[in-house]
Image: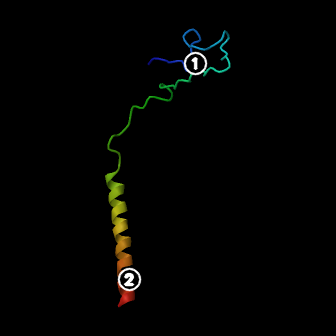
Amino acid sequence: MNHISPDPEPERSTGLEPGGGVPPGETPPAESSMPEAGPQETHNPTKGWAKGPLAAILALAVLVAAFFLVYALILIF
């Protein structure tokens, strides 16, 4: 794993004064992100657990819709 320093290198950054200051009117160098931040993930399931919960949610939605349909029919007749 290569470590990339998030600090700009004064020798390679334009517009920096000695000591790292930025003169008036200059845009300071942007900060870089740290792509190596955080632990390396070794277990990342691609499919997940979507089929079971999705089926349960759909079944619950159908039951609730059927309940309200039957309730509306009972009120009408």
Which quarter of the figure has residue 76?
A: bottom left
Residue 7, labelled with which disc? 1
- x, y percent for residue 7: 58, 18
Residue occupying the point 57% across, 20% down = 29
Residue occupying the point 35% across, 45% down = 48
The image's colouring method is: rainbow
Q: For this view, does 38 lie left or right of residue 16?
A: left
Q: For this view, does 26 lie left or right of residue 75?
A: right
Report the quarter where the C terminus lies. bottom left
Q: Are marks 1 and 2 in contact (CB under 8 Å)?
A: no
Q: For this view, does 18 lie left or right of residue 5?
A: right
Which quarter of the figure has residue 73?
A: bottom left
Report the quarter where the N terminus lies. top left
Residue 41, labelled with which disc? none
Vertical placement of residue 18 versus 35, above or below: above
Give the residue type that dot 2 points to: Ala
Vertical placement of residue 36 versus 53, above or below: above
Q: For this view, does 68 lie left or right of residue 18?
A: left
Give the residue type that dot 1 points to: Asp
Give the foreground label among 1 and 2.
1
Tell me the residue that label 2 is attached to.
72
Q: Secondary structure at mark 1?
A: loop
- x, y percent for residue 24: 68, 19
Mark 1 and mark 2 lie on one chain; the one further toward the N terminus is: 1
Which quarter of the figure has residue 43?
A: top left
Q: CA distance from mark 1 to mark 2?
A: 67 Å
Q: Residue furthest front?
A: 25
Q: Quick one: label 2, few (<14), some, or many (20+) residues within 10 Å?
A: few
Residue occupying the point 32% across, 44% down = 47
> How many numbered marks are there?
2
Q: Secondary structure at mark 2?
A: helix
